[in-house]
Image (cartoon, rainbow, N blue to C red):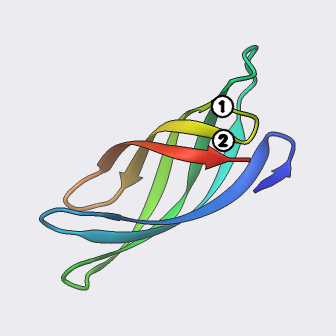
Amino acid sequence: MAVKGPLGVGAEFGAIAGHDSVALASINAYGTLPTSNARIQPFVTAGYTAGLNIAGTEGHYVNAGGGMIYWISRHAGVRFEYWGYARPKPGPIHLFRVGVSFR
């Protein structure tokens, strides 16, 4: 949701499946960066993530990342992004993600 010009806020819910499956909920601020190509929209993002693993252990993380959206039509695009989650133990989490964006 855009707040003013290139700045906005967003929220998402997701999961990471594997040996120690985790459900995540994040709230973030983001900013889009100027570009001369109307189909490419670079962005940066940072915020807070709460997680809960399969054993019931909670985690609270700071996240930051960035990427780009390649708009394939006026209202839909493919999103490529990197997110890093800071956590004390056992260390940071690094994710590369591909998704779909709508406007």
Q: In the image, 84: left or right of 11?
A: left
Q: Which mark is residue 76?
A: 2
Q: Residues within 10 Å of mark 2 (few under 14, many from 20)?
A: some
Cβ atoms under marks 2 and 1 closer than 8 Å: yes
Q: Quadrant of the N terminus?
A: bottom right
Q: Amino acid at mark 1?
A: Trp
Q: Residues within 10 Å of mark 1 (few under 14, many from 20)?
A: some
Q: Tell me residue 7's x, y (percent).
A: 78, 46
The residue under the point 37% across, 54% down is 86
Q: Quadrant of residue 74?
A: top right
Q: Given the image, on which type of amino acid does mark 2 rest? A: Ala
Asked if residue 56 is positioned above or below residue 34 in the image, the reply reads below
Say which element carries label 2: strand
Left or right of residue 20: residue 57: right
21 relative to 10 in the view: left or right: left
Q: Position of residue 26 (x, y in %)?
A: 52, 65
Q: CA distance from mark 2 to mark 1?
A: 6 Å
User: Who comes first in sequence, dot 2 or dot 1?
Assistant: 1
Frontmost residue, 80 versus 45: 80
Residue behind mark 1 = 71
